[in-house]
C-alpha cells in the first residue's frame, strides 16, 4: 500500500514544519504545499524588527531554500489560494485552477491582520502581517515622518521602536490604560511604556480611533474617542488578528475563532487536520488559540504524527514568546492572570535586566524577563514542571 498523498494548505511556519516533520517520520508519499502567497514561506518575527529596518535581505527570512524543498521532495506551489473543501470527495478547490485530491489534508492557513473600520480604505493606513506589508511600510518610515501606531501590543510596540530607530515621530494609540496591560500586568506595562517614552515614543492611552480623514497638510487626521485629533503621515494598524475560516465552515468543519482541533491536531472531519495560528485547540479549559511561534511549530509536529497514525508527542505549550525592542530582549512564558502579583526574583527593573514571576494564589503562573536569558531558562523550567504536574493532576481527576 502506497503512502498517503498529503496536501498542506498554507504558506507559513506551520505548513513548512508539518511537511518537514512527515518527511522526518519516514513518509515517502507525495507532499504538496498550496500557498496563497506568491513568495516562498518566510519567518514572520523579523518583519516588525530587522526586516522593517531594511537590515535583512529576503533570503535571510526564508524558512527553507529552493534546494531544501527539492531534497525533501516537497512540492511548493505559490499563488495557489484554496477556496473550498469537499471532505467527502477528499478534494480542495484552488482559485482559478482544478481541484486537488488528497488522502490527508492539513489546514495551516495562519491568521490575517484584523482590519480597523475607522481607517479602512485610507491610502496611508498599513497593516503588518506579510513580507509585502513590511516592504510597503519600510518605504514610508523615513526621518521626520509622523507615524501613528494603533494598538499597543507586542507588534505595535516593535513597530514603534523600529520607526523611532529610523527617525520617525511616533505616537501609539492604545485603548487600555497602558500598552500590553492584559498580557503582562500593570507593573511591567508601566515599565515598558516608560522605556518607550524615554526613546521618544508618545502614547495616547485609554482612547480609540473613531474616524479618519484627510489632514490639511495632506496627511491623515485621526479623530479619537475623547474628541481630540492626531495628524500623521502614515497609520499602522496592529489590533490583533482574524482567521479566515468561512470556507472551512461551509465544508462542515467546526469553527469558532479558528479551526477547532483537539490537541493532536484532529478536526471533526476524517483525514483533515489543523496546525498553526488558524487552530483553536479544544481543552478542558475551553477553546485555546495556538498563538505564538513556538506553539505553532509544536502544533505542526503533533499534526504530522497524528496524520501518519503515530502517537502525538507530548509537547507542552507554555505560552513562550519573545520580543526585541529598544535594544531589549523580552521573554515571556506562562500567563499573567488578572490579579496576579509580579515579583522580581533576579536583577533590577531600573537597570533593564531582570526576571520576575507572576504569582497567582501563591503559585507561579508566568515568567517575564528582560536581558536575562539564563535566569529566564531556569525560571521557565520551574514553570513547565509546575504546569506538567498540574496537567497530570487534572487528567487523573
Image: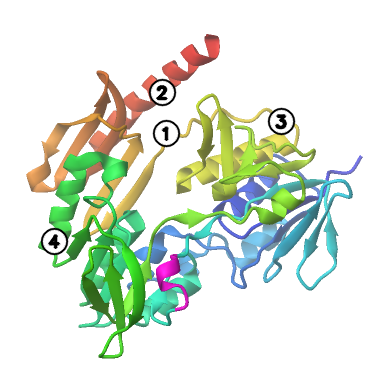
- Residue carrying label 1: 318
Task: Determine crowd level at label 1: few under 14, some 14-19, many 20+ residues with C-alpha closer than 10 A.
Answer: some
- Residue carrying label 2: 387
Q: Position of residue 110 (x, y in %)?
A: 57, 54
Residue occupying image coordinates x 52% and y 63%: 42
- Which numbered mark, 3 or 1, is in the foreground of this view? 1
Residue occupying image coordinates x 22% and y 77%: 168
User: Extreme top residue here?
Assistant: 397
Query: Mark 3 and mark 1: span between their CA atoms?
Result: 23 Å
Q: Earlier in the sequence, mark 2 or mark 3?
A: 3
Residue occupying image coordinates x 52% and y 64%: 62
Q: Secondary structure at mark 2?
A: helix
Q: Position of residue 294 (x, y in %)?
A: 47, 44
Task: Determine crowd level at label 2: few under 14, some 14-19, many 20+ residues with C-alpha closer than 10 A.
Answer: some
Segment tinted magenta in the rendering: 116-121
Closer to the camera, 360 or 315? 360
Task: Determine crowd level at label 3: few under 14, some 14-19, many 20+ residues with C-alpha closer than 10 A.
Answer: few
Q: Is residue 197 above or below residue 263?
A: below
- Which numbered mark, 3 or 4, is in the foreground of this view? 4
Query: Mark 4 and mark 2: span between their CA atoms?
Result: 36 Å
- Residue carrying label 3: 310
Q: Are marks 4 and 2 in contact (CB under 8 Å)?
A: no
- Residue carrying label 4: 197
For the rendered model, the colour scheme is rainbow
Amino acid at each position: 500500500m502506497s503512502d498517503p498523498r498529503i496536501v498542506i494548505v498554507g504558506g507559513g511556519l506551520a505548513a513548512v514544519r508539518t511537511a518537514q516533520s512527515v518527511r522526518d517520520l519516514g513518509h515517502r508519499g507525495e507532499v504538496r504545499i498550496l500557498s496563497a502567497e506568491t513568495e516562498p514561506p518566510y519567518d514572520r518575527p523579523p518583519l516588525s524588527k530587522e526586516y522593517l529596518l531594511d537590515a535583512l535581505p529576503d533570503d535571510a527570512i526564508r524558512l527553507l531554500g529552493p534546494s531544501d524543498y527539492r531534497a525533501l521532495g516537497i512540492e511548493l506551489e505559490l499563488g495557489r489560494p484554496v477556496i473550498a473543501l469537499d471532505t467527502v470527495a477528499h478534494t480542495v478547490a484552488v482559485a482559478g485552477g482544478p481541484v486537488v485530491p488528497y488522502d490527508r489534508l492539513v489546514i495551516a492557513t495562519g491568521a490575517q491582520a484584523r482590519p480597523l473600520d475607522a481607517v479602512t480604505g485610507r491610502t496611508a493606513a498599513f497593516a503588518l502581517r506579510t513580507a509585502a506589508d513590511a516592504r510597503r511600510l519600510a518605504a514610508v518610515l523615513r526621518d521626520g515622518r509622523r507615524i501613528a501606531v494603533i494598538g499597543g501590543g507586542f507588534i505595535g510596540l516593535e513597530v514603534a521602536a523600529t520607526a523611532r530607530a529610523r527617525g520617525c515621530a511616533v505616537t501609539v494609540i492604545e485603548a487600555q490604560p497602558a500598552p500590553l496591560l492584559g498580557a503582562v500586568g500593570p507593573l511591567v506595562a508601566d515599565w515598558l511604556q516608560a522605556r518607550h517614552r524615554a526613546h521618544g515614543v508618545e502614547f495616547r492611552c485609554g482612547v480609540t480611533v473613531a474616524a479618519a480623514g484627510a489632514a490639511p497638510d495632506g496627511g491623515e487626521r485621526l479623530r479619537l474617542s475623547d474628541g481630540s485629533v492626531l495628524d500623521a503621515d502614515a497609520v499602522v494598524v496592529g489590533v490583533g488578528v482574524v482567521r479566515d475560516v468561512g470556507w472551512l465552515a461551509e465544508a462542515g468543519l467546526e469553527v469558532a475563532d479558528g479551526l477547532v482541533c483537539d490537541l493532536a491536531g484532529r478536526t471533526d472531519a476524517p483525514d483533515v487536520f489543523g496546525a498553526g495560528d488558524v487552530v483553536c485547540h479544544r481543552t478542558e479549559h475551553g477553546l485555546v488559540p495556538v498563538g505564538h511561534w513556538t506553539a505553532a511549530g509544536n502544533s505542526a509536529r503533533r499534526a504530522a504524527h497524528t496524520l501518519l497514525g503515530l502517537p502525538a508527542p507530548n509537547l507542552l505549550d507554555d505560552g513562550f514568546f519573545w520580543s526585541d525592542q529598544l535594544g531589549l530582549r523580552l521573554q515571556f512564558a506562562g500567563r499573567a492572570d488578572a490579579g496576579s502579583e509580579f515579583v522580581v526574583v533576579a536583577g533590577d527593573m531600573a537597570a533593564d535586566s531582570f526576571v520576575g514571576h507572576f504569582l497567582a494564589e501563591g503559585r507561579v503562573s508566568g515568567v517575564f524577563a528582560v536581558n536575562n536569558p539564563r535566569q529566564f531558562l531556569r525560571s521557565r523550567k520551574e514553570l513547565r514542571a509546575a504546569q506538567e504536574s498540574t496537567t497530570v493532576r487534572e487528567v487523573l481527576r
